[in-house]
Amino acid sequence: MKKIIILVCLFVFCTAVSAQLHMREVFAQLPDSVLPLMSKNNRLDCIDFIENGMEARVKNHFGDPVILDSLTHDYLLLHTSELGYVEMKLLSKAPDTLLCVNRTYYGPVADSEVRIYDASWSFIAVVRRPDFGQFFKTSGESGKWQVEELDTLRMIRSEAEVLPLMKASLSSEPGKVEWVLQTAGFSKELKKVASRYLQPVICDL
């Protein structure tokens, strides 16, 4: 009987914690400073729309559309404008739960900043970006780069170093973020071959 009572208490406790840390509540209660263009009523309307199978579209303080595309128990994707979006992810980091926020802007090339907050939305840190060299494959299909491939690789590095913009995506794998070096500013010819030499970088949060 005592074991049953303990199990019931644990279940109730875990359910309460889970409900408290659901992304729905996190999004509803976040401070205006995190999303200054949206009011709390905007956010509540988005939640209501998406939970009722409707398009979660509202207007921000400037009258521009904001769309909540995805809302799960631990993840959110919000298109804040035509030029950017925000991702949020709950991270289980013992002994606390942290909040990860990825802001990505197109100007016109995508570039991201990833920040970590505690459960009360106090800022903790900006997530460090990968080192530039991590985006480049170390060898070709034959095990090493041919001379002409090395020339192309040098051209790509030289072009990318001018303005090394990186797009982040919060991975479905817990505690991970994927970074992709942007090539939109490359010449048309260089952009065609860049995928042979570049790779995404997955980092721990």
Image (spheres, helix red, strand yellow):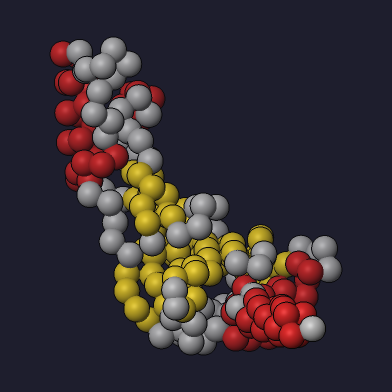
Question: Based on the displayed image, in which of its 4 quarters is residue 204 positioned?
Answer: bottom left
Question: Residue 13 location in percent, x, y?
Answer: 67, 83
Question: Residue 158 location in percent, x, y?
Answer: 17, 36
Is 58 or 143 nearer to us in this picture? 143
- Quadrant of the rendering where the N terminus is positioned: bottom right
Q: Residue at x 79, y 69 (%)?
A: 51
Question: Based on the displayed image, in which of its 4 quarters is residue 77 positioned?
Answer: bottom right
- Quadrant of the rendering where the C terminus is positioned: bottom left
Side of 169 where 44 appears, left or right: right
Compared to residue 153, the image places residue 128 above or below, namely below
Q: Residue at x 83, y 68 (%)?
A: 52
Is 43 or 173 nearer to us in this picture? 173
Question: Based on the displayed image, in which of its 4 quarters is residue 152 positioned?
Answer: top left
Compared to residue 54, the image places residue 138 above or below, namely above
Compared to residue 131, the image places residue 94 above or below, namely below
Q: Residue at x 28, y 61 (%)?
A: 128
